[in-house]
């Protein structure tokens, strides 16, 4: 039972930051603005106070809509992955603040170590400081104007909505970061337990399988009602497309390979 609960937690906490389903879920959370402050999810763009002399509108149009997930950062908090990155105002005579200055600004804002910095790649880009600690309550994301050094955006855990807060905790627990070594031991035990179940199940089947037979149960003479079961599988297949495609492939294989044999029997 405990292993099943652990596996269920792994599934639920891992889906929001998976490659396919997680991307769609993040987009849904972004469009729904689940408790996030105005501007954090792209309702408003933040710019430097300095005006752009030439070509500013063109540069803005080029980089409008850049998200945190587009930046070359090793890790970013899940809650800010789809947030819009603000822009600096390009000024021909302006000089970029140094990286040391950015580090000093981050330290002044309370972000002191073990964080990543994305450098501005364009004339309207910003310095982005991303802090992704084991405790989600300490997460911080700073966007700093590359010319003036002004903090254009500061997103912390207190700005997250309830859904994002829950997912942030789930992500930290899933990755074995929240409780340190104890968290890693528990997560490893669940993973090893699931692997042991898969291996032991195959071994048990090998020991009990009939000789030269598949060993599948016989078809019942009268099939029980399956409407609710089929409906549930259809809903799950729609929510999880890869799972739905797998179930459809297995169903087709069963109909092609064993359907005619079962009918003759």
Image (cartoon, rainbow, N blue to C red):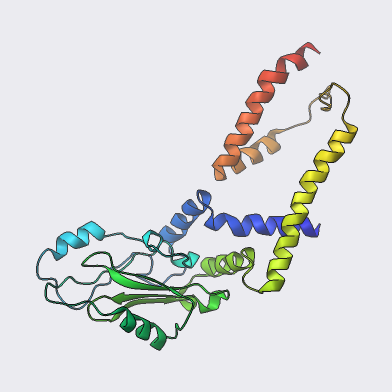
Q: What residue is shown at x 83% (from left), y 25% (from top)?
A: 220
* Quarter assignment of residue 255: top right
Q: Find residue 161 and report its horizontal and vertical position in percent.
A: 49, 70
Quarter in which the C terminus is drawn: top right
Residue in front for this viewpoint, 257 or 118 = 118
Q: Is residue 205 above or below residue 255?
A: below
The total of numbered circles placed on residues is 0
In the image, residue 168 lies at what x, y percent? 55, 68
Instruction: Say which quarter of the image contains residue 13.
Output: bottom right
For the N terminus, give its image quadrant: bottom right
The residue sitting at 58% across, 64% down in the picture is 171
Answer with left or right where residue 246 lies relative to residue 72: right
Q: Position of residue 160 (x, y in %)?
A: 48, 72
In the rendered structure, the answer to whether residue 187 lies left or right of residue 160 reads right
Q: Quadrant of residue 92?
A: bottom left
Tell me the residue at 77%/17% (across/down).
262
């Amino acid at each position: 039972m405990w292993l099943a609960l652990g596996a269920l937690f792994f599934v639920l906490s891992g889906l929001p930051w998976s490659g396919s389903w997680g991307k769609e879920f993040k987009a849904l959370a972004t469009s729904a603005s689940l408790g996030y402050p105005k501007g954090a999810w792209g309702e408003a763009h933040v710019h430097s106070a300095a005006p752009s002399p030439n070509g500013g509108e063109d540069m803005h149009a080029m980089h409008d809509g850049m998200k945190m997930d587009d930046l070359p950062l090793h890790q970013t908090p899940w809650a800010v992955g789809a947030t819009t990155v603000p822009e600096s105002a390009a000024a021909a005579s302006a000089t970029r603040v140094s990286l040391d200055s950015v580090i000093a600004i981050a330290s002044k804002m309370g972000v002191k170590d073990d964080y990543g910095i994305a450098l501005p790649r364009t004339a309207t880009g910003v310095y982005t400081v991303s802090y992704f600690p084991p405790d989600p309550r300490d997460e911080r994301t700073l966007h700093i104007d590359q010319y003036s050094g002004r903090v254009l955006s500061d997103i912390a855990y207190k700005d997250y909505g309830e859904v994002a807060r829950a997912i942030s905790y789930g992500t930290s627990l899933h990755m074995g970061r929240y409780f340190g070594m104890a968290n890693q031991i528990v997560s490893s035990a669940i993973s090893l337990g699931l692997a042991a179940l898969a291996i032991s199940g195959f071994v048990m089947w090998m020991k009990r399988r009939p000789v030269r037979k598949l060993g599948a149960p016989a078809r019942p003479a009268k099939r029980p009602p399956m409407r609710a079961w089929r409906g549930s599988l259809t809903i799950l297949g729609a929510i999880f497309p890869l799972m739905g495609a797998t179930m459809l492939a297995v169903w087709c294989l069963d109909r092609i390979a064993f359907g005619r044999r079962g009918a003759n029997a």
